[in-house]
Image (cartoon, rainbow, N blue to C red):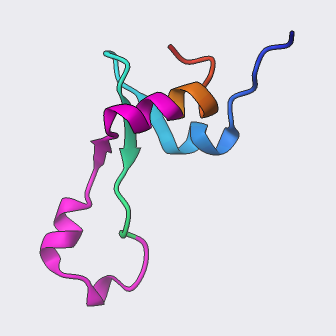
Amino acid sequence: MPKMKTKSSAKKRFKLTASGKVKGNVANKRHCLSAKPQDMKRQARGTFILFKTDGENVKKYYLPGAK
């Protein structure tokens, strides 16, 4: 059976930490920023760690080669 391919969209959106957790970007930071509160924009900086089950699903279905 051939290897499963990694989804190229997931490659761009997710990274794995050294401990195997999945790291992603925070949403709501692209447009209409003038209508959003400053606190919301500040909290949306940088990245965040996905919940355990969501991270497991991303690794299983979208990043099959990553351990």
Task: Please tell me which residue is depicted at 36% across the width and 69% down the height of the picture.
Answer: 29
User: Looking at the picture, how far across and down is residue 42, in whole percent?
Assistant: 17, 65
User: Looking at the picture, how far across and down is residue 15, in whole percent?
Assistant: 45, 32
User: Looking at the picture, how far across and down is residue 3, in whole percent?
Assistant: 78, 15
- The residue lying toward the viewer, choosing from 47 and 2, is 2
The image quarter containing residue 48 is top left
Where 35 falls versus 67 (above or below)?
below
Report the span colored magenta.
30-57
Where 29 falls versus 46 (above or below)?
below
Instruction: Assess whether residue 48 is covered by the magenta stretch.
Output: yes
Outermost top residue: 1
The image quarter containing residue 60 is top right
Outermost left residue: 39
- The residue lying toward the viewer, choosing from 29 and 7, is 7
Task: Please tell me which residue is depicted at 35% across the width and 26% down the height of the picture.
Answer: 21
Which quadrant of the figure contains the N terminus? top right
Task: Please tell me which residue is depicted at 42% across the width and 72% down the height of the picture.
Answer: 30
Instruction: Assess whether residue 38 is covered by the magenta stretch.
Output: yes
Outermost bottom residue: 35
Outermost front residue: 53
User: Looking at the picture, how far across and down is residue 61, in whole percent?
Assistant: 62, 31
